[in-house]
Image (cartoon, grey):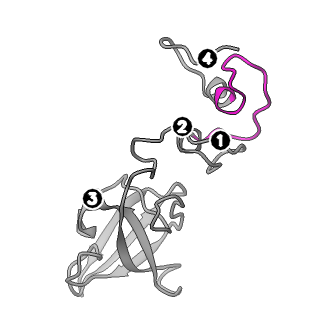
Amino acid sequence: MATVPGSGVLSMLKLAREALYGDYNGSGTITGSIGLYALVNGGNQNSGNTYPAVNQDCLPNPASRTSTTLTGVRGAMGGNAPRTLYYNASIGAASNLTQGDQLYTNSSLTTAEGQTFNEQTGSTATTTICGNGGLMFFDTNTSGQYLGGTCQFP
């Protein structure tokens, strides 16, 4: 069985085969698309297969991370009940979130947020993105990455 080479061009298909079958040059069946997030962190997000986690000690794998909260987030143009989202505590206050930061629906940071439209009413708390009286409209992609948004004040 062949392992992943130490140099040269890598193939996503062959990396997927290595992850699932332990054989980089093998012929095991891979179904659907190959999501890099799932391939590295485990699971099947944006992938046709469920992969084992290989990234145990680095970000974005949640193995040794602590979370902090983003409170009072509403989806679907504000019509849904408020919920709490979570992100890596190393970011600090919610106002420090920047494009590309990962948001999750659970405090163990394993289930990515996936709603495309979100809103949050600002406050003086560190768990809101906008300051007191502001209304933050932001998006996440299907992988839970914060895409940024607009803070509006009346």
Give 143 or 5, whichever is nearer the viewer: 5
Tag 4 residue: 3
Q: Earlier in the sequence, mark 2 or mark 3?
A: 2
Q: Which residues are magenta?
A: 17-35
Give 3 or 154, whichever is nearer the viewer: 3
Tag 1 residue: 51
Whether 19 is among the magenta residues is yes
The residue at 37%/52% (across/down) is 100
Give 128 or 62, whichever is nearer the viewer: 62
Give 98 or 106, whichever is nearer the viewer: 106
Please, what is the three-letter code of the amino acid marked with disc 3?
Ile
Q: CA distance from mark 4 to mark 1?
A: 17 Å
Q: Locate residue 62, reporting x and y percent.
A: 45, 52
Q: Earlier in the sequence, mark 1 or mark 3?
A: 1
The residue at 49%/81% (across/down) is 77
Tag 2 residue: 54
| Mark 2: secondary structure | loop
Q: CA distance from mark 1 to mark 3?
A: 28 Å
Is 137 situated left or right of 44 in this image?
Answer: left
